[in-house]
Image: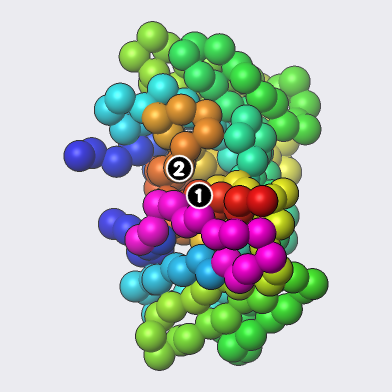
Amino acid sequence: KAGVTQTPRYLIKTRGQQVTLSCSPISGHRSVSWYQQTPGQGLQFLFEYFSETQRNKGNFPGRFSGRQFSNSRSEMNVSTLELGDSALYLCASSLAWDTEAFFGQGTRLTVV
Amino acid sequence: DQQVKQNSPSLSVQEGRISILNCDYTNSMFDYFLWYKKYPAEGPTFLISISSIKDKNEDGRFTVFLNKSAKHLSLHIVPSQPGDSAVYFCAAQYNNNDMRFGAGTRLTVKP
């Protein structure tokens, strides 16, 4: 069974640009969550999608947005990138919103 | 590659008893370990952490034990309370780099 796949693995962008990250969940999983991980900040929740609907959102500015497609694949978009957006972005999928989540390897975003 | 493993998807304990959640890792480079707690429909929240230079860290009812030779850590909750019912994630990292997570263990504390 394939795991959660995140693409790309690494990304370098300049300030002011926008970026889109992709997450393919485990087959059959309908819940996808996104997290930001930075040194010292640990894991911070961005948002969670279930059946194409955003169910929950963390405390991040509106520059961070996401969506989920009918095949459960999800994308996360960050507009007007700032240096502080440099982080590892993790995606996790689960069968439902209240079952165990499986994390992808993450996308390492560096903003210069 | 699953560098952090939580082999028990679920655990059920009686209120007041001890809950023990286990985590194994394969990468000996890991030098910092964390436990996160996640309620349904909420993002995970940080619970407790331990550096590889220690073998035990306590915070109230929560204690994390690290056995470096066995590449194993555990989270003890004593006494367990119904409000502790959640999914618990073990995570590991090194050099302040990428954090690797286990799949999680669902803890149910029965009143």
Residue B79 occupies quadrant: bottom right
- State the residue position of label 2: A100
Residue drawn where x is 61% and y is 53% of the image: B109
Chain hosting mark 1: B
Q: Secondary structure at mark 2?
A: loop
Residue drawn where x is 39% and y is 36% of the image: A6
Q: Quadrant of the N terminus of chain A?
A: top left
Q: Position of residue B69 (x, y in %)?
A: 40, 90
Is B60 or B12 nearer to us in this picture?
A: B12
Q: Position of residue B85 (x, y in %)?
A: 62, 49
Name the mark on residue B106. Answer: 1
Q: Position of residue A94 (x, y in %)?
A: 43, 34
Q: Position of residue A5 (x, y in %)?
A: 34, 37
Asked whether the beta carbons under mark 1 and mark 2 sit within 8 Å of each other, the answer is: yes
Q: Is residue A4 magenta?
A: no
Residue drawn where x is 46% and y is 86% of the image: B68
Residue A46 occupies quadrant: top right
